[in-house]
Image (cartoon, rainbow, N blue to C red):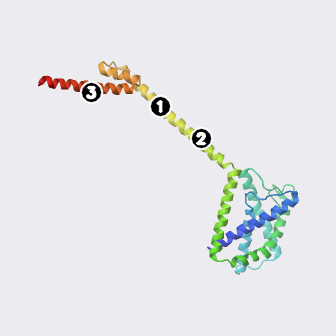
Amino acid sequence: MRLLNRYTVIFFIFSFLGWVWESIFCTICEHKWSNRGFLYGPVCPIYGFGAIIFFIIYDLIKAGKIPEIKWWMILIVGFIVSMILEYPTSWFLEKVFNARWWDYSAYPLNINGRTSVPTSLGFGVAAIIIMKLLIPAADKVISKCPDLMLNILSFIFIAIISVDITLTVSAISDFQFKVASIDEGFQNHMTETVNRILSTQGEFYHRAVARISLFVMAGRKGHIAKRLQKRDFKGLIQDFFDFEKKDKDKNQDGKNDGN
């Protein structure tokens, strides 16, 4: 559990450092403030994922599972990791949100503008600095943190990232509008269905009354059919009570005559 919390904290720290680096670099290049990353918060998750990869390598070296690697090896690993992370991330963001957060089309030896040799070499050099300086410093600080503090920090960072991702995705993809559209479509469909059912019941009722009316009914039965045709249910009920009253009075008179 401590190892997982450790990587979670590392992910957040280096995501923030990556955002600081990119924002400063792009602000200088563009001569205006540039808030890098696609999230609202000051984080660039791609740097966090890259840092976790190098932290795993660092832990394996520290545990004696793999031998110490030279600076040029770190450069190559950083170059490859950059290529692997940038291209699919750029493709995914473009397909999902129909937007590109970086475009290396103006750089030589680029691959569809999603990644390029010069920028990946730059990340390879940065990997040397991260591996030799930043990761050992971060490991030294985190190793002194008690388990409870790591648990709390991990929970807070996950909550912040989760809220940030939810808000960003909702805003970019018009999530609320889509939900409202889906709800409106559902309501319209249910309204049409209920109206169709009620219409069918109405047609069935009229057909039934028409069939009843085909029969020649004398006396009270004919009167009932006429009431049904006019949908005069109140009059029909009143007639029923009047008939019952007359029938009861008639029986009572018969009993009195017998006495």
Image coords of residue 22 (percent x, y): 81, 62
Residue plotted at (38% across, 27% down): 234
Q: CA distance from mark 3 to mark 2?
A: 52 Å
Image coords of residue 39 (percent x, y): 73, 58
Q: Which residue is mark 1?
A: 200
Give the quarter of the figure containing the C terminus: top left
Q: Earlier in the sequence, mark 3 or mark 1?
A: 1
Q: Earlier in the sequence, mark 3 or mark 2?
A: 2
* Residue 143: quarter of image: bottom right
Q: Residues within 10 Å of mark 1 (few under 14, many from 20)?
A: few
Q: Residues within 10 Å of mark 2 (few under 14, many from 20)?
A: few
Tell me if I can see residue 107 in this picture. no
- Between disc 3 and disc 1, the foreground one is 3
Residue plotted at (69% across, 54% down): 169
> Which residue, as the protein is rendered here, is positioned at the far left?
259
Q: What secondary structure is marked by label 1?
A: helix
Q: Which mark is residue 102?
A: none
Q: Which mark is residue 244?
A: 3
Q: Number of callouts in the render?
A: 3
> What is the three-letter code of the residue carrying label 2?
Gly
Q: Nearer the viewer, residue 144 or 129?
A: 144
Image coords of residue 44 (percent x, y): 75, 62
Side of 222 where 125 appears, left or right: right
* Residue 79: quarter of image: bottom right
Q: Which residue is mark 2?
A: 185
Q: Earlier in the sequence, mark 1 or mark 2?
A: 2
* Residue 240: quarter of image: top left
Q: CA distance from mark 3 to mark 1?
A: 34 Å
